[in-house]
């Protein structure tokens, strides 16, 4: 007996809801290979919501009797409860959640269950379920993002006034406020939120009623189901409605950009918690030890957040590649959309959650930050600006200060260590007031431009975010 024969499914072909035209039973390997129930069972709630809206509309349109709609509706609600309670058997021989629910409906209410699938296809069902699921997934991520922003805001408020080195090329650049640095991330996460909201506004449109691809001769009302399900409109083209997955691609793109932002934040948490920086101490509850080196306290959570970014980027490549060569309309390849969609969501959500908690459990070593800023040349720009104010062209000022810094470096000095006499060797315009400009702690307050690190500007931002992020609660 051939292996293929031996593996023939015990399932009778006529138990498949599409079994009519088949003489042979589906090979077990083929069944296992093609089923998606293990993943798409996560869509049960949305699948049932879509079906309830559909039968209600069928009855309103006089396509099925109200009593039939009631029977189907009751059955579907019972099934939803069974799944909620964990007593539903997902191994009932059906390949996906749509078939599994319909099969169970047949078991519960008999042949009237067959009317549920009037004027619809699994193709529009899948697209409807996914759009509904993503709608709440996005609400979930928006809230996670808000909480992460809030945890950053709390730390920014607590440490208002703390000065630290700002970096470019990971070299100390200018003194900045710690709050200003943390607020930069709040801005990034706000744009991430708007990307999700933006994707949501395009996504929240109903494909239901497109049927397999060309619509249906049965007099359904697509606007009715769209309204019941809270969609803002219906998709205008039935072929487009069932054949694109751009809404998933947009969703995962937004997840990927969020992950990129998170990964940069994670990188800073790793760096800042190192002994070299010692800017932060991450709470014990969010760090781990080494099995061999007793002294170690590792920032594993931040590293994992940084690492998991790869998974989210992978999910994006996955779906983009799956979709790129597909002719219209539905192709079974598209069933592979579930895994990147769920994976991107789960990973992004987890990373946002852990980071918000970890930020709250982080201590800022402000003395260390202050010391760092006093031990570098980060007021060099101030010094150049000082010369500009004394009438020297900026390029020339830059040159003069460059020479002063080189002199300091050669003689192991810092800028505030220089005497006025020495400064006069570089330019006669230096005066006693220069020393004020060399104090890094006074540097942020001298910035005047909008959006700068000056305490006045930062304070405005803190107040803005406080009201924005609290309002959203
Ligand atoms: N499980 C399938 C999916 O998620 C359902 C659609 C199947 N449609 C079809 N024509 N075979 O894509």
Image: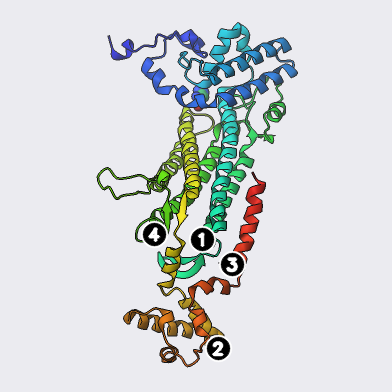
Q: Which residue is mark 4?
A: 278
Mark 2 or 3 closer to N-term?
Answer: 2
Q: CA distance from mark 1 to mark 2?
A: 32 Å
Tell me the residue at 42%/80% (across/down).
Answer: 415
Tell me the residue at 41%/84% (across/down).
Answer: 418
Q: Residue 358 versus residue 28: which sits nearer the camera?
A: 358
- The local crowd at label 1, few if under 14, some if 14 to 19, many if 20 or more residues have their Cα within 10 Å, is some
Tell me the residue at 51%/88% (across/down).
Answer: 432
| Element on which disc 2 rests | loop
Q: CA distance from mark 3 to mark 4?
A: 24 Å
> Is label 2 or label 4 in front?
4
Q: Residue 380 versus residue 9: which sits nearer the camera?
A: 380
Q: CA distance from mark 2 to mark 4?
A: 40 Å
Q: Residue 227 versus residue 30: which sits nearer the camera?
A: 227
- The local crowd at label 2, few if under 14, some if 14 to 19, many if 20 or more residues have their Cα within 10 Å, is few
> Is label 1 or label 3 in front?
3
Mark 1 or 4 closer to N-term?
Answer: 1
> Is label 1 or label 2 in front?
1
Where 444 sits versus 292, above or below?
A: below
């Amino acid at each position: 007996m051939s292996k293929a024969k031996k593996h023939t499914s015990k399932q009778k072909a006529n138990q498949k809801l599409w079994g009519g035209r088949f003489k042979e039973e589906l090979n077990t390997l083929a069944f296992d290979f093609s089923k998606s129930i293990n993943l798409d069972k996560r869509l049960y709630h949305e699948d049932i919501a879509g079906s309830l809206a559909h039968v209600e509309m069928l009855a309103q349109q006089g396509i099925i009797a109200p009593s039939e709609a009631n029977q189907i509706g009751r059955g579907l609600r019972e099934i939803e409860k069974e799944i909620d309670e964990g007593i539903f058997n997902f191994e009932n021989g059906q390949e996906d959640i749509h078939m599994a629910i319909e099969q169970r409906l047949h078991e519960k209410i008999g042949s009237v269950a067959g009317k549920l699938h009037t004027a619809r296809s699994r193709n529009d069902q899948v697209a409807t379920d996914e759009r509904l699921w993503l709608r709440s997934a996005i609400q979930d991520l928006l809230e996670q993002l808000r909480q992460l922003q809030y945890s950053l805001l709390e730390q920014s408020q607590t440490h208002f006034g703390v000065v630290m080195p700002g970096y470019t090329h990971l070299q100390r650049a200018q003194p900045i406020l710690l709050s200003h640095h943390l607020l930069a991330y709040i801005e990034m996460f706000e744009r991430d939120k708007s990307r999700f909201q933006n994707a949501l506004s395009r996504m929240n449109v109903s494909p239901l009623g497109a049927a397999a691809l060309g619509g249906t001769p049965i007099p359904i009302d697509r606007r009715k189901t769209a309204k019941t399900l809270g969609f803002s409109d219906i998709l205008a083209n039935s072929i487009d409605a069932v054949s694109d997955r751009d809404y998933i691609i947009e969703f995962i793109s937004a997840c990927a950009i969020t992950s990129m932002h998170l990964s940069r934040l994670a990188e800073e948490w790793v760096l800042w918690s190192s002994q070299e920086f010692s800017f932060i101490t991450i709470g014990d509850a969010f760090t781990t030890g080494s099995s061999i080196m007793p002294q170690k306290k590792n920032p594993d959570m931040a590293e994992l957040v940084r690492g998991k970014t790869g998974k989210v980027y992978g999910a994006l490549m996955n779906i983009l590649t799956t979709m790129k060569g597909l002719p219209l309309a539905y192709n079974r390849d598209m069933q592979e959309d579930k895994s990147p969609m769920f994976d991107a969501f789960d990973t992004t959500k987890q990373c946002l959650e852990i980071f918000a908690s970890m930020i709250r459990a982080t201590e800022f070593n402000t003395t260390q930050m202050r010391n760092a800023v006093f031990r570098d040349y980060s007021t060099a720009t101030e010094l150049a600006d000082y010369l500009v104010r004394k009438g020297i062209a900026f390029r020339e000022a830059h040159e003069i200060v460059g020479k002063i810094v080189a002199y300091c470096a050669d003689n192991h000095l810092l800028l505030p260590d220089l005497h006025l006499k020495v400064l006069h060797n570089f330019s006669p315009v230096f005066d006693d007031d220069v020393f004020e400009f060399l104090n890094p702690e006074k540097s942020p307050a001298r910035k005047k431009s909008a959006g700068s690190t000056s305490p006045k500007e930062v304070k405005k931002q803190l107040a803005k975010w406080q009201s924005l992020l609290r309002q959203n609660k």
